[in-house]
Amino acid sequence: MIIKEINQELINIVSKENVRQYEPMKKHTTFNIGGMADIYVLADTKEQIQDILKIVKKYDVPLTIVGNGSNLLVKDKGIRGIVLKPNLKGITVDRDKITASAGELLIKVAKIAAEKELSGLEFACGIPGTIGGAIKMNAGAYGSEMKDIVLKTTYIDMEGNINTIYNKEHEFDYRRSVFCKQKAIIIETELELKFGQKLEIEKKIEENKRNRIEKQPISMPSAGSIFKRGEGFITAKLIDECGLKGFTIGGAQVSEKHAGFIVNTGNATADDVINLISLIKNKVKKKFQVDIETEIQIIGE
Ligand SMILES: Cc1cc2nc3c(=O)[nH]c(=O)nc-3n(C[C@H](O)[C@H](O)[C@H](O)COP(=O)(O)OP(=O)(O)OC[C@H]3O[C@@H](n4cnc5c(N)ncnc54)[C@H](O)[C@@H]3O)c2cc1C
């Protein structure tokens, strides 16, 4: 009943097409896995987000924020309450600075940077997340990360206030930022890049792309690297040395191409993935006496 009521209130804020009741989250994750969200809502403007936060408060329902779902494993029973996708769009370039809204794909921003002969985002060309997800997770690859290029980020806090923080205040660390400890909705970020040579930038992007195609199972549904980089060891190498490449539980498989990835071979459940993660952790611990940590975010029930 309450879900129906909330649904109606959300429709009044964002229009009917942007609210879905009992929406399968497998449609919104790159893993193609996940149970139903009670309500899934897309917000195109910051005012809509502020109004949605009022509904969250009024009904005291849980709020989950998602971007492109490329770092998420949503559990099989789904997500209670409201799942909000901040879908704000817009990219502007001013000399060596790019301002991008949270709902823009990082790959698109990287492409525009290359077109404008701006260097610094080449690392991001194969990361399938949004700007919002990339800021929260401090996305990175090939020795670079968001931390290196972010000037400032604007976000809405849970009270609906709009705030701006500058680079240091993001508390960027390996695949984390201040937004991992403080819930907020990122709406926009400004990046500072460097003027470069178009050919050089394009060459680097091609090199990175080739590297991914060669080494990663990018044609199969996954959430990227399942585990964090190890301190003093390469996690994927340890998993490989446990003989786990190709090992399967249900529809979840340790990628035959890259042992750090788990792929969905077609009908994997979140339980399959969680059981496989736990098996990998145990095998690695037994053989190498090290604890490996998950990098992906596991959410829902
Ligand atoms: C094939 C593949 C390759 C990958 N390679 C890399 C890689 O090289 N490097 C790397 O770092 N990652 C990689 N990833 C993981 C993933 O793409 C990144 O973590 C990405 O930054 C996540 O962005 P997203 O929009 O998909 O966020 P989601 O997965 O949807 O969410 C991730 C987190 O960000 C939060 N979030 C999302 N948007 C917002 C917002 N607007 N405001 C507040 N919080 C928000 C969510 O609540 C969640 O906690 C890869 C994934 C895949 C599938």
Image: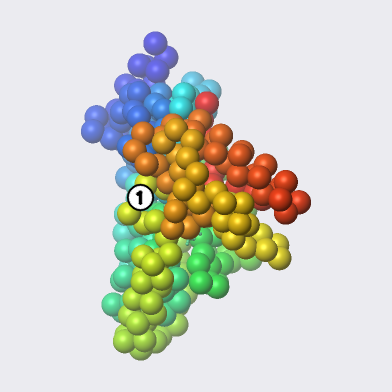
Q: Which residue, as the protein is rendered here, is positioned at the far front?
A: 243
Residue at (32, 54) in percent of width and height = 219
Q: Is residue 83 above or below residue 29?
A: above
Compared across the picture, whether 230 is left or right of 47 comes to right
The colour scheme is rainbow
In the displayed orientation, state which residue is furthest to the left.
17
Q: Quadrant of the N terminus?
A: top left
> How far from the left and from the top, in percent, is residue 278?
61, 38
Sort mark 1 into few (<14), some (14-19) or many (20+) by Cα contacts within 10 Å. some
Q: Amino acid at mark 1?
A: Met
Q: How many marks?
A: 1
Residue at x 30% of width, y 30% of height: 19
Residue 113 point in image, percent of width and height: 35, 74
- The residue that mark 1 highlights is 220
| Nearest the eye: 136 or 57 | 136
Q: Residue at x 31, y 28 (%)?
A: 20
Q: Foreground: 21 or 25? A: 25
Splitting the image into 4 quarters, where does residue 197 fall? bottom left
Tell me: residue 287, above or below residue 150: above
155 w.r.t. 40: above or below? below
Residue at x-position 37% and y-position 41%: 265
Residue 267 seen anywhere in this rendered image of the structure: yes
Q: Nearer the viewer, residue 54 or 42?
A: 42
Q: Is residue 10 visible?
A: no
- Residue 53 percent across, percent down from the top left: 47, 34
Find numbered disc 1 in the image and state the secondary structure of the residue it sits on.
loop
User: Which x, y percent locates residue 292?
Assistant: 66, 50
Classify residue 185 as left or right of residue 17. Answer: right
Outermost residue to the top? 1
Left/right placement of residue 292 relative to residue 121 reads right
Displayed quadrant of residue 212: bottom left
Q: Is mark 1 within 8 Å of ligand 1?
A: no
